[in-house]
Amino acid sequence: MKSLPNAILILSMALLLSSVKIYSQTVDLRFIVIQNDQTVNGTYAVKAQIKLNTESDMGTSSIQFSYNTAGLDFPSTPVENTHFFYHNFQGFIPGGVPFTNYSSTVTRPILGKVSINIVLSIGADGQTITTDWMDIASIYFTILDINEFSNLQWIQETTTIFNDLNSQFTNGTFFDENSPLPVELSSFTSKLINDKVQLNWQTATEVSNYGFNVERSVKDGEWSTIGFVEGYGNSNSPKSYSFSDKDLFAGGSEFRYRLKQIDTDGKFEYSDVVAVTVIPTQFELAQNYPNPFNPATTIRFSLPQSTQIKLNVYNLLGQQIATIAEGLFEQGFHKVEFNASELPSGAYIYRIESANFVQVKKMVLIK
């Protein structure tokens, strides 16, 4: 939904994407954030992922990447299967039975650069790489400064994939997206179901997502907050949300909705707007609420078409004591407030009338 200031904590999916031709094969690589602890000396973790345009075996490979040493630290002597690095590959014996026969070494020969060598044992077939994103490795850093970029990127000149095919990354575009979208909204829909508007939305990724204010505008009027839905915080998998607007007596038939996505640090951004047309099927005067009341109550009525109406209040002697609403009202659901602070306790009649209908209800004031 937005880009944020230079902070490691805002990095999310697809920090980097690269493509290159291997014969008729296209190899894509990217980093995906899986952990981003905001605290000082917290943990920043990513997955390195790969996919191909057609399936193929992965043999002995080497990947190299660099990072911003002002913001991140990587251990000088990392060991595989510690909390610093995990690789995700298996080899296959003849017949396709999987067993773990990949080994790896992880080195940091130059400050700010890391080399991961994934070696396939002789005589075994490499793991099949598919056309969908799959993990190469999980890589963990220590955060030194949360106000710095990660600057995590592949090193094009030395990265080698499918070494046994003698193929290297000699072409392709390598780029680093330092300010990605912290909360990526993939869908936002609205639908009228019976007497309520159902809102549904989904995020693809989330970083520091506190939650969503649900806002509504009627007849192109001002926006007002009608609810809040808590976010998941940090996530790199799809998350689904919903909210039901059950109060349609807002004075019209055109309802617009938007989401105000709020970060844990208070920053926010708005979604696109979705709209619903809500038209009653009949004239109706609803029972006031609360009832009994003191000293104010709300009266609701619905109009299937624009109509001149009068809404009056009478005592039990039939004397008119107040006019609550009068004039041309648009089609839709409406509500008005009646304040009886100057009236004595007792029962009262309220009556709505137009050229097309008349309806009466009773209400009770108790002081």
Image (cartoon, rainbow, N blue to C red):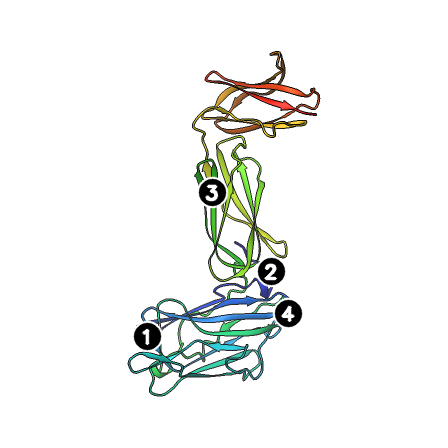
Q: What is the CA distance from the residue labelled 4 to the residue labelled 3? A: 42 Å
Which residue, given by chain and number where applicable, does mark 1 sit on? 56
Q: Nearer the viewer, residue 15 or 185?
A: 185
Number of other residues with Cα within 10 Å of mark 3, as a class: few under 14, some 14 to 19, many 20 or more = some
Which residue, given by chain and number where applicable, does mark 4 sit on? 145
Where on the picture, by quarter, is residue 97? Answer: bottom left
Number of other residues with Cα within 10 Å of mark 2, as a class: few under 14, some 14 to 19, many 20 or more = few
- Classify mark 3: helix, strand or loop: strand
- Classify mark 2: helix, strand or loop: loop
Q: Which mark is residue 316?
A: none
Q: Quadrant of the C terminus?
A: top right
Q: Foreground mark, 1 or 3?
A: 3
Q: Foreground mark, 4 or 3?
A: 3
Q: Foreground mark, 4 or 2?
A: 4
First in sequence: mark 4 or mark 2?
Answer: 2
Which residue, given by chain and number where applicable, does mark 3 sit on? 198
> Looking at the picture, does residue 248 appear above or below residue 270?
above
First in sequence: mark 1 or mark 4?
Answer: 1
Q: Amino acid at mark 2?
A: Pro
Side (left or right) of 198 relative to 364: left
Q: Nearer the viewer, residue 306 or 350?
A: 350
Q: Residue at x 61, y 19 (%)?
A: 348
* Residue 151 visible, this angle: no
Q: What is the CA distance from the residue labelled 1 to the residue labelled 4? A: 40 Å
Q: x, y percentage for residue 27?
A: 38, 71
Look at the numbered discs 1 and 2 and tell me whether their residues touch, using CB distance below 8 Å.
Answer: no
Q: Amino acid at mark 1?
A: Ser
First in sequence: mark 1 or mark 3?
Answer: 1
* Residue 350 visible, this angle: yes
Q: Which mark is residue 5?
A: 2
Q: What is the CA distance from the residue labelled 2 to the residue labelled 3? A: 34 Å
Q: Foreground mark, 2 or 3?
A: 3
